[in-house]
Amino acid sequence: MKILRSSSIRRAEAALYLVVFFLILLFSAMTPMLADDYSYCFSWVDNARVCSLGQIIPSMAVHRNLTNGRVFTHALVQFLLMFPRGLFALLNAGAALLLLFLFRSYLGRLSSPRRALLLSAGALLLWDVTPVFGQVFLWLDGAVNYGWGLCLLLLFLRPYAVLWLSGEDARPLWRRLMFIVLAFLAGTWSESASPAVFLAALCLLLLSALRDHKPDLFLLTALAAELFGILFLLLAPATRGRASIGFDLSSLVSNLKAVLLQSKAVMLPLYLLYAGTLVPALSRSTDRRSLILSGILLLSGIAALLAYTVAAYFTSRHFCFAVCVTVLAELVLLAELLRAEQPLLPRLVTAGALVWALFLFPLGALDIAVTYKHFREREAAIQQALDAGETEIRLEIYVPATPYSAPYQLEDLSPEPHVWPNGSLEYYYGIGSIYGVEPAEAEAPLP
């Protein structure tokens, strides 16, 4: 009986991974190409369709001068766009699993049912709270920039957390060399999240050095590699010109106000949940090192948000990193309560997140399916126009109802042809002029 019970518990944890993998695979496959996806099908050098790896390097060299310094991110985007959608959907589902496994690695030693409980809470909270879930986890360009970036940044931060929690993280030479490369890439991934993770790693490294009376030279070297990646990103010609304010005081105050107001709307439930968990965690016999790690994760998310006070713009998808690390910080606290044999609050959090998701999931899944249907109708209309020799076409813009559909709050089509993103779609489909119209206007005659 005990063996069967243990086996069923392990199956329950595996079932969570299977459900997440299947849902992200399905939803990714049903999320259409949008906006930047069409643009990145073409080289930044000569606007030729990208069909080989040899075109990507010169394309990204121009991209670094004209658009932004995230050349490794967008090189991966251009690479994926050379293949059928199924490849991205499969890799994106794998990235979702990797994110869960990374969450698991930050929680320390727990029994399988307790891990399943906390990982379920983490997955549900990400679904419930992420402002534009479809953009950052399902849309190809957005997922590589944000969802996959989360995996890379948490992979980079993990050895610093391990060092702080349990001492030296022994690694063979080949893994150390690979980690240096990973550290550099982590620095190049995000203008806001990469510096925030650098600060978190620096804090953990300093705390570990003070405790052990010696610095970890390898992790110090990796930290320098990440810093070099950050400089590579921020010193790109295009990136240097994207700070909107030039540190003008009035603009700083205005941007800070906008960040705080939007953060209140998005982050307040997570911060209240964190505060409500921190109080019992402090009052119980919990591991001080885990509490400090949790606080550093929380502060890194806040730092990433504050970075947008000097940015050219601030959108809902920029909350992705802050939401993720705040959820992880909450899970670290809940894990400490479980180890202190205080399971009530972790169970309540999971149950509350589940009830919240039960309301949101049917709406989100239906909205993704409706958008996919409209995408298929759009492609059929384009093909019909091409077969008839037409050079102009009206296409309905996507009007999603929930943030789980990627076009939600994302610029789709313009009423005017040849401007972005219409121009990219015109090149992609080989049609002369595309007009974006509201659904009610789609049947009106062309001008």
Image (cartoon, rainbow, N blue to C red):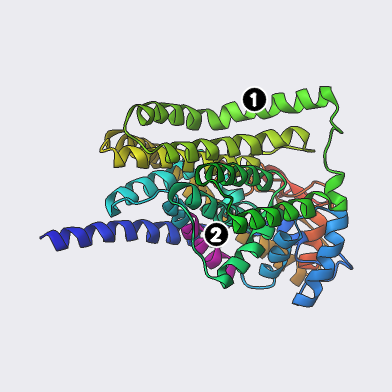
Crowding near the residue tagged with mark 1, few <14, some 14–19, many ≥20 C-alpha atoms within 10 Å: few
Q: Nearer the viewer, residue 415 or 245?
A: 245
Q: Amino acid at mark 1?
A: Leu
In this picture, residue 37 sits left or right of residue 32 = right
The image shows residue 65 at horizontal and vertical percentages of 88, 56
Residue depicted at 36% across the width and 45% down the height: 118
- Residue 249 sits in quarter: top right
Residues shaded magenta: 87-99
In this picture, residue 206 sits left or right of residue 385 = left
The image shows residue 221 at horizontal and vertical percentages of 66, 57
Question: Which residue is the site of mark 1?
Answer: 261
392 vs 118: above or below? below
Q: Nearer the viewer, residue 191 or 200?
A: 200
371 vs 78: above or below? above
**Local SS, label 1:** helix
The residue at the far left in this view is 1
Q: Nearer the viewer, residue 439 or 110?
A: 110
In this picture, residue 318 sits left or right of residue 104 = right
Question: Which residue is the site of mark 2?
Answer: 28
The image shows residue 40 at horizontal and vertical percentages of 76, 62
Residue depicted at 56% across the width and 46% down the height: 209
The residue at the far front in this view is 213
Q: Which numbered disc flags the more N-terminal residue, 1 or 2?
A: 2
Which numbered mark, 1 or 2, is in the foreground of this view? Answer: 1
Q: Which secondary structure is most common in the magenta stretch?
A: helix
Q: Distance between the Cα atoms at labels 1 and 2?
A: 31 Å
Does the rendering let one see residue 447?
Answer: no
Quadrant containing the N terminus is: bottom left
Does the rendering let one see residue 207?
Answer: yes
